Amino acid sequence: MFLLSLLPAFAGEAAPSAPPEAPPAASTPAEPVPAAPPPPADAPPPPDFSAIAAPEPAPQQIFPGMMNPSMSFNGLFLAGAQLNDGELAAPHLGGEAGESAFPMAGESYGTGLNVQEMELQILSNVDPYFRANVVLAIPGLEGIEIEEGYVQLVSIPATTVTIGKVKGAFGRENLTHTHALLTVDKSLVGQAIFGGEGLNDVAVNAAVLLPTPWYSEVTAQVDRGSNELLFNSGKPEGFGYLAHWKNQFDLSYDTSAELGVSGTAGENDAGGWSKVGGVDLTLKSHGRGRHQFNRVIWQSEFMFMSRDGADARDLGGVYSTLEYSLDSRVWVGARYDYLGIAAGAEDQAQAASAIFVFAPTEFSAFRVQAQRQWVPGGHTVDSVVGQLDFTIGVHPAHSY
Amino acid sequence: MTLLLSLIVASGEANATVNIVTSTQDLAALATAVGGSDVKVDYIARGDLDPHFVDAKPSYMVKLAQADLVLAVGMEMEVGWMPSLLTGARNPKVAQGSAGYLDLSSTVKKIEVPSGSIDRSRGDLHPEGNPHYWLDPENGRLMARAIAAKLTALDSAHSADYAKNLATFESTLTTKEAGWAAKMAPLKGSNVIGYHSTFNYFCHVYGMNVIGFVEPKPGIPPTPAHTLEIGQAGKAAGVKWIFVEPYKDPKDAGPIASMTGAKVLAMPTSVGAETTIKTYFDLFDALVSRVAG
Ligand SMILES: [Zn+2]
């Protein structure tokens, strides 16, 4: 909490901030530019304190257009067909989480046409200290919800403090927007533990980049603990707690590995505590020169939930995706899901999915997914889903 | 509080040299030429890769987190990756708009700046004009001057070194330019086809005409109809070469080559595109010798 205690102090000192530094005279630069104040790094220690008290007055401009926030709109349309061999609950197409063929198997996609999601993202700097991001989502054409809405303190070195409704930094899948997933749906284990919308709550978190030679980031979060499947104690002090340690190493310029460890815990609605731990491992590689777009990505996550209280139970699972890009526009992939580690037969499920993606540009993509789910009772659910994805507005950031 | 302060003090120490991170290897070569021994230079996009499409790898955030100065091409060349890298770097010193961030497009002579309305139906790449401006050696001069000015502002203690390095760079460039111009003179008026508009600055400088592109629109792969159209136009114009970037497939230019009789030439686009191209001068030496022998 020492970061929060810093807030009033720096807000008070910020008012008499230095006048904006003139940009260098680029057209006549052969002559030395009028001596600017030495950079904070060259000043005697503590050199960067001034950077906290009075950061560079120019805002961190993410995209052109200083006064208008950057906006983008993303839509996902679905068309699907489903074949079931048994007596299953009525399948749906792209609706809310939980309305699945069986309660723990996650979403499946029925026959028909639907809108999976419409999303409006608004991103801007608030002032030199804060950045704000709002994502309004219309899931399945019904209602509008604030999928994310937060401000971030971005003016202190090495640390980002986020306040608002955010996706929890648990593993990789939970942080990924639906349209950026390899697959049409989320993993069985992710949906079974966190629900279709994932771990997404009103929170305060700090993400610190550690001073290591590789990328190492620690995130600590306190949230409302309102996830319905996991926490939801109903008590005002029933917080959820989350920690995430993300590491990324370059094995060579073209090949990298990412290893993450995550944990979250909070009081549940059955008088006990729910705890979830996870490990994620991702390997990525691409070629040189004209093979730049021939990429292989292998991503796996293991998650384990332990719940005590009146309905105590354990549930673990794993998913693994493999993706290969033939060129910048075409890629193929597969996912395997296993759910039911340390669980009873009623929680056992597996799924195998094959995915083909054609992305004409970075702004549009067409995806086909064929999936078989093996659900309890010896049933299988087969589905084929097509998804059309479009983005308008500011250029999307390349996710990694 | 104490923890945070000690962390900041630690990160601010040992900065006798200016730590520069550039988006491309061309900018790194220029920064090395101007900064000399007073700077430490690292880059993000290796020269054999398409700089429009770079992974926003977290390890690059680590480089940017330790940087005193970031050099970027600008003109939306890095729009897909630099903003997220800078956000992840958590280094207010080099945030876009701050003194430690230099967008070099503000200093150069640009071509193909669109007038009228721009829309992504025209392809998704060059909304602010052609960003491959480092392939005009005079722009290299302007960029080197801007880097020297920025280094002088950030590190005035070494301003004499920067002025001296810049003068050396400029005089070598002037000599080199005369040699390149002499070799390229007979090619003035030649017609060529590009894959993408990467070599438009280079052709513009030496009076070669780019009559069309293998790709129908920036960032859009070739289509049969466009290939036929450009092949016919190329044949009529007597096209000499089809220039292909190291990150494009020369096979895509094959049909046009056989229609026109033009030669497909793999051309380096950046320092580092080939292992022998280590400096900004090496890049033009390679380009000039490839077309003019
Ligand atoms: Zn381009």
Image: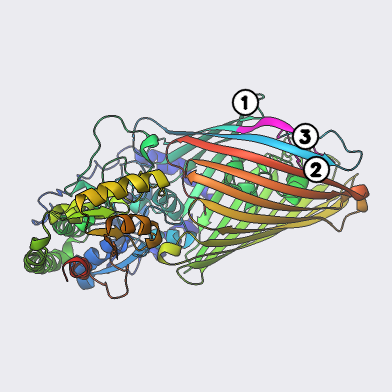
Measured Cα–Cα span from mark 3 to mark 2: 8 Å
Looking at the rendered structure, the secondary structure element under dot 2 is loop
Mark 3 or mark 2: whose residue is earlier in sequence: 3
Between circles 2 and 1, the one closer to the viewer is 1
Disc number at residue A268? 2
Residue at mark 1: A144
- The residue stretch that appears in magenta: A94-117
Give the Cα distance between marks 2 and 1.
27 Å
Instruction: For the residues labelled 3 and 2, say whether their Cβ atoms are less than 8 Å apart.
Output: no
Between B144 and B290, the one nearer to me in the picture = B290
Q: Is residue A386 above or below residue B210?
A: above
Q: Would residue A367 be counted in the magenta stretch?
A: no
Q: Is mark 2 within 8 Å of ligand 1?
A: no
Disc 1 with disc 3 on a shared chain: yes
Cβ–Cβ under 8 Å for marks 1 and 3 = no
Which quadrant would residue A157 be assigned to in this image? bottom left
